Amino acid sequence: MSEGGSQPSAKLWGGRFSRPTDALVDELNASIGFDQRFARHDIAGSIAHARMLAKQGIISADDQAEIERGLKQVWREIQAGTHEFRQSDEDIHLSVEGRLREIIGAPAGRLHTGRSRNDQVATDFRMWCREAVLMLAAGVTDAINALLEIGDRYPDAILPGYTHLQRAQPVLLRHHMLAYGEMLLRDLDRLRDVYRRTNQSPLGAGALAGVTYPIDREMTAQLLGFDDVCANSLDAVSDRDFVIDTLPACSQISMHLSRLAEELVIWSTPEFGFIELDDAFATGSSIMPQKKNPDVAELIRGKTGRVYGHLIAMLTVNKGLPLSYNKDLQEDKEGVFDTVDTLGMILRVLPPMLQSTTFRPEPMEQAAGGGFALATDIADYLVKQGLPFREAHEVVGAVVGYCAAEGKDFPALSVDEWARFSPILAEGRPPLTPRDAIEARNVQGGTGDQVVKEARQAFDARFETFQEWIAEKTQQTAVLDALLETE
Ligand code: ARG
């Protein structure tokens, strides 16, 4: 990008000014450095706007044809990397219009009829956001598929379930993976919600109050793949709640993946030894030769911080703004760009990392059988023999206390030792394997082998509706490419 320099170029809005803007103001004011990401949306939006102006008789068909031809050329130049993004052009809207004027001359001056940069930027941004939402949703489906695949790869694997990071009760690995699947399905649902509210067209709201030309807002909305038009012009140009909706949805995805990442970090330690990360998804230490560090998982966890940060920044930018547009709103972009880039990256790296991770069912199951993780099952056994649960809890608590003092675990206790704690335990043997614990939990939503198999099937059906939604909306948003196509 070239600098404004000491000879700033004439502004498209320069009419009422007798002196050029200070170079520092140009620098502060410019958003071209980042809003160039809207180039595709901006040009498609202009093509749709010009077609509508011609259809309504507001500009001539000849001018419209020239404008469209010129805009398509600008788009080709931007794609080819030959378009010059100049700081003095301020933003993507003026940059495109300025270049259009260079290419087609006078008719370019008619494009901005019945439009303002205020409805223009809101339109561009909504189109950008809806695509970002779909891209992230597709990434979330990849992550879900990777989690399902782990469950399918180790359908019988058992690991300890934890509370307070203390071994609590055995669970199936597949059940554990499906837990994240549920979280991510809700994340998809949130994204679907965000998309629905985002995909409304502000175009035609003008600067803030609507315009004085007989425009057709439905036409531009339809050409640009919007589901509806924004009902109120002031709201259309000044609210950014579609951005603010996107950020908490991203924050929760990030948070869920961060929890998963944390588990991968823990599971990969030699102390746990539940998983082995593939060499391609781990890093070494420059001083300690033995190290194989889970940096990828740690970065997934760590990057969640900046995602949360952008949410708070965006809420704060918006909170004191009187209606309608204020330049503060130019600060609405970089945070969400960084959020989408960051989360997009995480969603690209996580699935292959999960796919290449080796799980170790033996140490996992061994851990699930130790640490008194079967205590609840023994208490339940006593209850089924007639003891009230509170008494059973008391009895097993005493067994645990005894074991802890003796440095033993349940399986090491002799018949005599069991007998000391309850006559019931003198007679029969309580369930003592993690597999027993799993098989005992075939209740709805539980970790029982049968119900988890069913849950896996039921999950697929719900998951499919989101995949269909992504495919349908991706097709809907592809109308922009059709607008930009040159025959
Ligand atoms: N670059 C501006 C933004 O991002 C575009 C809208 C400018 N509107 C205005 N009235 N200055 O918000």
Image (cartoon, rainbow, N blue to C red):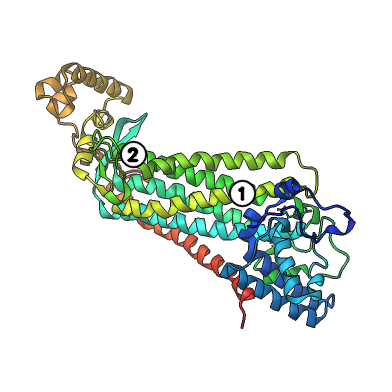
Q: Residue at x 68, y 46 (%)?
A: 331
Above or below 105: residue 311: above
- Quarter-wise, where is residue 363 in the image? top left
Label 2 secondary element: helix
Q: Residue at x 76, y 56 (%)?
A: 8
The residue to which callout 2 is attached is: 265
Where is residue 309? Give x, y as percent: 57, 39
Using the image as rendered, state which of residue 30 and residue 247 is in the foreground: 30
Seen at 26% across and 40% down, the residue is 159
- Please identify the quarter of the rendering in which residue 405 is found: top left
355 lies above or below 113:
above
Q: Are marks 1 and 2 in contact (CB under 8 Å)?
A: no
Badge 2 local density, few (<14 within 10 Å), some, or many (20+)? many
* Total number of numbered discs in the rendering: 2
Q: Amino acid at mark 2?
A: Val
Residue 223's spot in the image, x, y percent? 68, 72
Residue under numbered circle 1: 334
Ligand 1 in which quarter: bottom right
Q: Is residue 94 visible?
A: yes
Mark 2 Cβ and ligand 1 under 8 Å apart: no
Q: Is residue 201 visible to us here?
A: no
> Is 66 placed left or right of 440 in the picture?
right
